[in-house]
Image: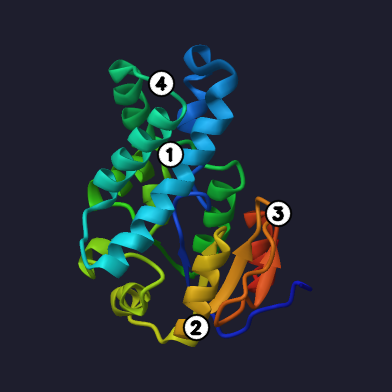
Amino acid sequence: MTAKRLDGIKGCVFDAYGTLFDFNSAVAHCRDVLGDRADALSRIWREKQLQYTWLRSLMGRHEDFWQVTGDALDYAMKSLAIDDKSLRDRLMSLYQTLAAFPDAVPMLQRLKAGGLKTAILSNGTPDMLLAAVKATGIDRLLDAVLSIEEAGVYKPHPSVYQIALDSLALAAPEVAFVSSNAWDAHGASAFGMKVIWCNRYGQGREMLPGAPDVELTTLADIPAILGLPR
């Protein structure tokens, strides 16, 4: 997809995990214990975390993202025959202070300097998100940190994206939604937002309603897409 300029944007709303924060960084801190099982654990943990959000939404059996993250980790550890409670506790603690991607803070600084509203809209609980934004210093660059808990259902349910519009007092076409997750990008697009897909992981295009307006590989390109000076 060719990068194009998005006009009329007054606010940027970001997914958190995988977009601003590196979900692999928790496991990376535990490679000393996990060894060659580290990459598999991180992959399975993330896959199950997302699957459980979708399945719980369909089942009408909501639990918050902290519970879902713990359940997904338990599945991943069991699937790899890892029985270590202290390691589980360490990984869950590290998940609260994930590292920000190197392109996140400079990009947010440029958006704020350009006068745009900025927010996070995430599956994470309010406590999880507060810990993450404070640990990375991103909190001072955001107008709002929004959790799906206000809706009681996970992305990509339309009621979740409405939370951002209500908080920022903007119409859908005035918002650029940014996610590294293709399914999330399609969900926001189907809702009516302009969408920037930061395809960090070389994902294929999804066959879903909606479509990203712009596809990038780094957040660093976003200010230019929105017409901000370098």
Say which amino acid is labelled 2. Ala
**Is any atom of residue 147 visible in this view?**
no
Q: Which residue is mark 1?
A: 136
Farthest-out residue, top? 32
- The correct choice, above or below, for 70 with respect to 17 in the image is above
Q: Which residue is mark 2?
A: 190
Quadrant holding the N terminus: bottom right
Do tag 2 and tag 4 residues touch (Cβ < 8 Å)?
Answer: no
Q: Which of the two labelled residues, at mark 3 and mark 1, occupies the earlier sequence position?
A: 1
Dividing the picture into quadrants, the one containing residue 117 is bottom left
**Is any atom of residue 203 visible in this view?**
yes
In this rendering, which labeled residue sits more in front, label 4 or label 3?
4
In this rendering, which labeled residue sits more in front, label 3 or label 1?
3
Q: Nearer the viewer, residue 153 or 102?
A: 153
**Disc on res. 202:** 3
Label 2: few (<14), some (14–19) or many (≥20) C-alpha neighbours in 10 Å: some
Say which amino acid is labelled 1. Thr
Label 1: few (<14), some (14–19) or many (≥20) C-alpha neighbours in 10 Å: some
Say which amino acid is labelled 4. Ile
